[in-house]
Image: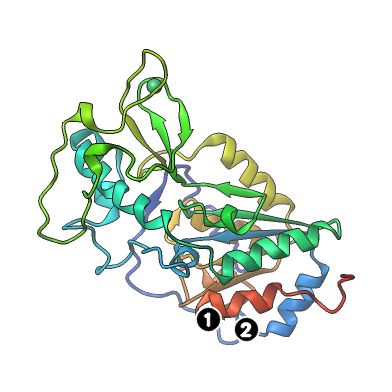
Amino acid sequence: MLLKGRAVLSLGLRMCSTHVTAGPVIEPGRPSSDMSEFRKAFAKAKNIAIITGAGVSAESGVPTFRGEHEKWRKWHSQDLASPEAFSRNPSRVWEFYHYRRELVLDKKPSAVHLAIAECEARLKKQGRSVVVITQCQDDLHRQAGSKHVLKVHGSLLETRCMSCGQVTVNKQSPICATLKSKGAPGANVPDAQIPVDKLPRCEERDCHGLLRPNVVFFGETLDSHILTNVEKEIEICDLCLVVGTSSIVYPAAMFGPRVASRGVPVAEFNMNTTPKTEYFMYHFQGPCGTTLPPALAPHESEEL
Ligand SMILES: [Zn+2]
């Protein structure tokens, strides 16, 4: 069994990123890219888990903040999306998140989001289920109509109070007056240096605590309630799709391999192979906007 001896890899619950310098060695002929074989597995599946990552958001034009060229000013997202960065310089981190919020607020669901939502609605009528387990922090799966979505890395469009812990959906643009027109990403743009009492603040009575984006920063623990639900879904699914994720951010990178270790078919849809490709039964290379919709289209065996 391919996974023996490897399944104990990094199952810690803190979000962290690995830096992979060389690709994995893949046995010739495996994984398969035979769509007709995948479609047979799809036709039989009763509980489908679809794990999505930044590549799905990228289909809607949301930058992935991955790789050397995707910096904001001088920094990579890992340098800004951390509890240390936020406590050291909340103004800078809020500028970064304000920029990201404004970007996602005017984006629309892509063909990938729509295909997943349509598949969930269609299969539900057949007594079958689809769950989306997403690392994306935008709201595009829900906008597309997906009902069962587990957001493992939080949401750009929610805030959490540092004092009282209140989580609030917040789609205001800008989120506060002082961030208006701030957050430009150019390398030479100076920090706005907004005083901390002029950053987004809690509106609960008598609180006025500093708000932060309700996202999981690098080094932080994932929400245990969401993680419990994810565990349940990856235990019961009988087909798993891993879509548009480079599979380098843990623990999400291990969800697909965990399913594969039970002998359940896992299909990866991505622009490139990833450090986890060799664990999976199927790999479909290319933009997921092209490869995914036909994979989830009605099968001839479905009673429509
Ligand atoms: Zn509060």
Alpha carbons under labels 2 and 1: distance apart = 8 Å
Q: Are marks 2 and 1 in contact (CB under 8 Å)?
A: yes
Asked if residue 119 lies left or right of residue 86, the reply is right
Q: Amino acid at mark 1?
A: Gln
What numbered label is drawn on residue 33? 2
Residue count near mark 2 (Cα–Cα under 10 Å), binned few <14, some 14–19, many ≥20: some
Q: Nearer the viewer, residue 300 or 205?
A: 205
Look at 53% across and 81% down and name the residue there. Answer: 285
Q: Residue furthest right?
A: 303
Earlier along the polypeptide chain: callout 2 or callout 1?
2
Look at 27% across and 42% down and name the residue there. Answer: 94
Q: Amino acid at mark 2?
A: Ser
> SS class of the residue under badge 1?
strand
Give how far across and how far down residue 166 sits, in percent. Answer: 45, 25
Residue 44 in the image: above or below residue 87: below
Give how far across and how far down residue 245 sits, in percent. Answer: 48, 65
- The image quarter containing residue 288 is bottom right
What numbered label is drawn on residue 285? 1
